[in-house]
Image (tube, grey):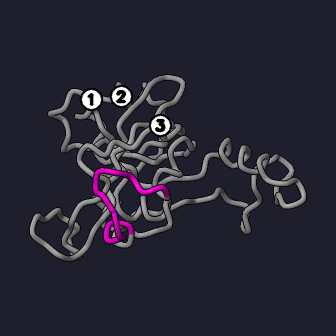
Amino acid sequence: MNKCLLIEKTISDLIALNPAEVENIKYTCEAKLEEIDTTYGWWYKACYDCKGGVKNYDGTFWYKLNTIVVDDTGSANFTIFEKSAQDLIRVSAQQLATATNSNRFVLPPVVENVIGQTFVFQVSLETGRFNTSMQSFRVIRMFQSSLSAKVKIEEKDEDDADISGDGAPASPNGTENLIQSSDTDEEEK
């Protein structure tokens, strides 16, 4: 049976999960993106077809953002890969990585702009990282937090703001503001 459930959790709830019991379960967590750790860089070279990392390849650069997110209950490592990161930043990793003066270990300003924002993250436990002392989660999707949307609207001139009666930004179809949807092959794993 494929457990494809969406369950709301706080960060402390996520950290307390038993890895043996949560394979293929998706959780949502509202949290602030506090930091992007560039110790291992913010992009990697990858095979275009399988997206696996390669060392000697002059082809494609993909995002791999190792982030620290926080809520009122704690902090956690969330990894945001290519499609999710590109939908968030709205510029390809290929374009940023090949720009003049680009440095794999220094975030471009356009990437830094997402730090400090609050999102609703849809995540799953990264099963390949159990050998570390801290659990890590792979971001599947990200949604603009209603809190972030309200703050951005308040920063706009009232005449320019397009809001619904509850103070949230109006969307054309009345749904939440989806930042990205993951690659189909990632969701089916």
Q: Dot 1: within a 10 Å radius of its alpha carbon, few (fewer than 14), some, or many (20 or more) residues?
A: few
The residue at 49%/43% (across/down) is 28
Residue denoted by label 1: 134
Spatial CA span between label 3 and label 1:
17 Å
Circles 2 and 1: CB distance less than 8 Å?
yes
> What residue sits right under mark 2 in the picture?
15
Q: Mark 3 points at which residue?
A: 34
Q: Which of marks 2 and 1 is in front?
A: 1
The quadrant in which residue 103 appears is bottom left
* Label 3 element class: strand
Q: In this view, does 109 lie above or below 128?
A: below
* Mark 3 or mark 1: whose residue is earlier in sequence: 3
Q: Which of 104 and 57 is in front in this view?
A: 104
SS assignment for the magenta stretch, majority: loop
| Badge number at residue 1 | none
Q: How far apart are marks 2 and 1 (CA)?
A: 8 Å
Q: Which amino acid does label 2 sit on?
A: Ile
| Residue 81 position within the rendered picture, expressed as x and y whole percent measured from the top left | 34, 57
State the separation of the CA atoms marked 3 and 2.
Answer: 17 Å
Q: Nearer the viewer, residue 188 or 59?
A: 59
Q: Which amino acid does label 3 sit on?
A: Glu
Q: Do the residues labelled 3 and 1 touch (CB within 8 Å)?
A: no
